[in-house]
Image (cartoon, grey):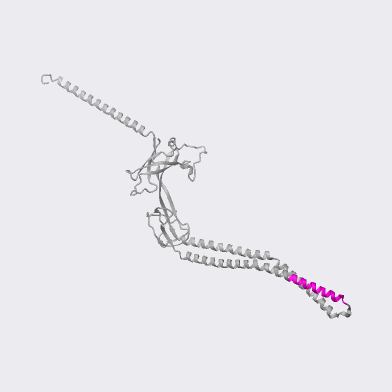
Amino acid sequence: MDDLPRSVEPALTTEARYRQRRSRTIWARLSLLFVLLAGALVSVGYWYMTLDQVSTDDAYTDGQSITVAPQVAGTVVALEVTDNQRVKAGDTLIQIDPRAYAAARDEAAANLRIAEAQLDSARLKLETARIEYPARLAGAQAQLDAATAMRFKADADARRQLALPRQATTQQDIDAATASRRNAEAQVAQAQAALQQADMVRQFVAESQAQVTQLEAQVALARARLDQAALNLSWTKVTAPQDGWVTRRNVEHGNYVQAGQALMALVTPDLWITANFKESQLDRMRVGQKVDIRVDAYPDLQLTGHVDSIQSGSGSRFTAFPAENATGNFVKVVQRVPVKIVIDSGLQPDLPLPLGVSVEPTIRLK
């Protein structure tokens, strides 16, 4: 190098620098090409892997929320639960003052006993009527027969007195025989009237039977009122209809509550996912397909489930004011259809999964 002329030395340096820059450019281009190829491979691989999958971030946990309300009014004398407490079916939630309802039950029980006593008396009268009135009819018939016989004798006596010569009888005997005949006729008329009155046996028995039927209805009414009073008394103790967690409690000890007033909500353990998929994602979606579920609140929690059902209508169709597209100003908007996804596995007891938290389900279309 020392033997070269000084004019040649800068030229060699420039050429070396050019070769060095060219080499770097080639490597940079090769690196960029490698990155592009790697990105393309990754993209193609991801596309291939997700070709049979659809997902949405418009999804949330859903479940049953039961509103707990009393069926009778009164003052809360005991509050047995607190916020977010786990309860079992049948557990007492609140106790309403039962004294007024216990008194109403006792009064209804007393009225029932009175009605039953009146019914027993009416039944006894009915049995008596079934025996007494036929006997009265038979007695009236016998009296009529006796009166008829007496009339026959009195008539025969009167005719004999009238048939005798005037010397063989007296006017007094004739008058007595005539009076006896008239008296016998009166007795027959009286016996006939008594027989007509006694002949209403069927009506008298039917009247007694109607009285029994009326009192039986009163007993049934009194028993129904007793059952209602007992039911009202049992309703003073408000119990949990199902297992679940107490939420949205708005009652305290000493509050006066009305029948039907919402006191708290009970979230049951039944849990599922409501996912609103685009209508363009429903083409290959079927009931029973497996689903992978990612929960935003717990990134490490992996849930699996399956498609339970697809709603027969888009979400907007069931709003209070559905869109009316027949106005002439139609703008097409991609609709979303709710899909119910049942969780099969992955839930952990120490990780509560509240209703309404965001999830991201991915459905395997094959």
Front in this rendered view, residue 63 or 5 = 63
Q: Is residue 84 above or below residue 359?
A: below
Q: Quadrant of residue 360?
A: top left
Front in this rendered view, residue 125 or 8 = 125
What range is drawn magenta here? 143-164
Q: Quadrant of residue 189?
A: bottom right
Q: Within the magenta stretch, is there residue 33?
A: no
Q: Is the magenta region chiefly helix, strand or loop?
A: helix
Name the residue at 25% across, 25% down: 26
Q: Quadrant of residue 190?
A: bottom right
- In the rendered view, does 183 fall on the left or right side of 35? right
Name the residue at 56% across, 66% down: 116
Quadrant location of the C terminus in the rendered image: top left
Q: Position of residue 162 (x, y in %)?
A: 86, 75
- In the rendered view, does 3 fall on the left or right side of 100? left
Quadrant location of the N terminus in the rendered image: top left
Asked if residue 290 can be seen in this view, the reply is yes
Q: Position of residue 289 (x, y in %)?
A: 41, 38
Q: Within the magenta stretch, is there residue 152?
A: yes
Q: Is residue 169 above or below residue 202?
A: below
Q: Is residue 240 above or below residue 162?
A: above
Name the residue at 30% across, 30% down: 38
Asked if residue 194 can be seen in this view, the reply is no
